[in-house]
Amino acid sequence: MDALTLDPVLARVCGAALAVVLLSGAWQKLRDLAVFEASVDIYRLLPDALVPLFARAFPLFEALAGAALLFDATRSAGLVLSLAVLGVATAGVIANLLRGHTEIDCGCGGAEGHTTLSWALPARNTVLLIAAVLGGQDGGSRDLMWIDYLSVAGGTLALLGLYAAANQLMANHPRLIQLRN
């Protein structure tokens, strides 16, 4: 076995968890496009004329990336799209952090969530980028058995739980700082 060969269970767990993250993120953005468009506008990275186009195209690419990660035939395309989507989102956050714009919403939580920009977002997205690389792997070193599918389901749920907990901590952190002061 090659040292770089990834177990297919780990590859599928990472791919499935990232697919859910991307698909749910796309759904939240598409469900309330006006809120997402306002978030894109507040980043002040695009000319005003491009904001509506970007706000409509980005969640579509996000959804395509998530869906592509779910199937063996499209996993490589899902990897490339995931890296592009996560890279663009992370670059936008970092650009605003470097300009000192931390009191704006990240635009990743839909109307329900409000997460202001912080360096925790690029850190979280780096973990997601690693998950994309792992999830985009073939993982064909062995055939999956029935128990492997249970492991994939459990592992996916565990990663999604960690992701939700991390997002909640990031959303609550500014409020905790306010309470201390």
Image (cartoon, rainbow, N blue to C red):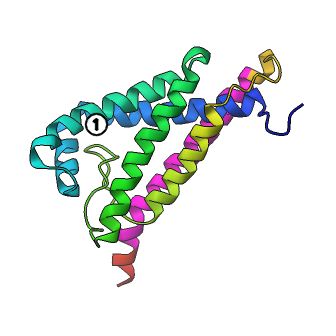
Residue 156 belongs to the span the image colors magenta: yes
Q: Which residues are magenta?
A: 149-176
Left/right of residue 11 with respect to residue 147 in the rendered view: left
Farthest residue to the bottom: give it.
181
Q: Is residue 179 above or below residue 171?
A: below
- How many C-alpha atoms fall within 10 Å of the one at disc 1: few (<14), some, or many (≥20)? many
Q: Quadrant of residue 145?
A: top right
- Circle 1 sits on which residue? 29
Q: Secondary structure at mark 1?
A: helix
Instruction: Indicate whether 140 appears above or below 41.
Output: above
Query: What amino acid type is highlighted by mark number 1?
Result: Lys
Specify the principal SS of the magenta part. Answer: helix
Q: Residue at x 57, y 26 (%)?
A: 76
**Residue 108 in sight here:** yes
- Where's the C terminus, which quadrant? bottom left
Q: Position of residue 62 (x, y in %)?
A: 39, 33
Q: Residue at x 65, y 38 (%)?
A: 134
